[in-house]
Amino acid sequence: MKIIDQKNLTEAVGALQNGQTVVFPTETSYGLGCDATNQDAVDKIFKIKERKSDKPLLVVVPSIEMAKKYLVWNDLLEDLSSKFWPGPLTIVGEWNKKENLATGVVASDNTIAVRVTEFPLTKFLSENLNRPVVATSANLADAGDIYDSKQILAMFSDKTSKPDILVDGGELPQNPPTTIVSVINNNLQILRQGQIKIT
């Protein structure tokens, strides 16, 4: 695993463009990501995390405009996005099939989980890649979130499948996880209450 400084984010973007997997700080904990349209890279994320293939991966995008390309927009999405995006809210909605996304990002029911990020680092990655970036937690399946880059290195030290690059942000503040809601069929379902409280 190559370690790069947060000042070298263009190198991380280049790695994403080349189908590599990257660990990076997010607004909550360390995330593990790749180009969400690259099937080989997404498959590698599942292998690294030892994650079941029926648990889809969420993506981050830098703007509501990009979210509108990949999601089938509805009134509920319009309302939530105008109030809470960009911000720590992940919305599960119907995938717009006109736009390419890898299997594993798109669930078996043709839904995707999207967040418009306001965190400068993740925004930079997605904006410069000009595509959605997978941003799943950088841990093995069923392990807790990781806030320290040293733990990342220790966790993957003896693994054959490991991320290609670590953007080292040191120790991150332990912020609560993002809130996750579903807007399928214009019907609001709260899947996880996190930083944003939705009733």
Image (spheres, helix red, strand yellow):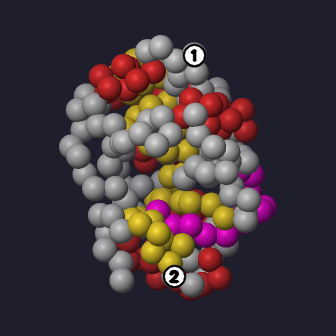
In the rendered view, does 143 fall on the left or right side of 171?
right
Label 2 neighbourhood size at 10 Å, few (<14), some (14-19), many (20+)?
A: some
Residue 96 on image: x %, y %? 72, 65
| Disc number placed over residue 140 in the picture, else none | none
Inspect the magenta stretch and tell me whether residue 164 lies in it: no
> What residue lies at 52% left-to-right and 25% top-to-bottom?
163
| Disc number placed over residue 160 in the picture, else none | 1
> What residue lies at 37% left-to-right and 26% top-to-bottom?
152
Q: Is residue 110 above or below residue 106?
A: below
The quarter holding residue 73 reads bottom right
Label 1 neighbourhood size at 10 Å, few (<14), some (14-19), many (20+)?
A: few
Residue 121 on image: x %, y %? 37, 41
Q: Is residue 132 above or below residue 66?
A: above
Residue 132 on image: x %, y %? 58, 49
Is residue 176 visible in this depiction of the protein? yes
SS of the residue under disc 2: loop
> What residue lies at 73% left-to-right and 48% top-to-bottom?
103
How far, Cα to Cα, is label 2 from label 1? Answer: 41 Å
In the rendered view, does 18 fall on the left or right side of 100?
left
Residue sticking out furthest to the right: 98
Foreground: 5 or 190? Answer: 190
- Callout 2 touching callout 1 (CB < 8 Å): no
> What residue lies at 54% left-to-right and 53% top-to-bottom?
58
* Amino acid at the residue labelled 1: Thr
SS of the residue under disc 1: loop
Foreground: 108 or 122? Answer: 108
Bounds of the magenta segment: 90-101
Foreground: 7 or 70? Answer: 70
Q: Earlier in the sequence, mark 2 or mark 1?
A: 1
Q: Which residue is mark 2?
A: 188
* Amino acid at the residue labelled 2: Leu
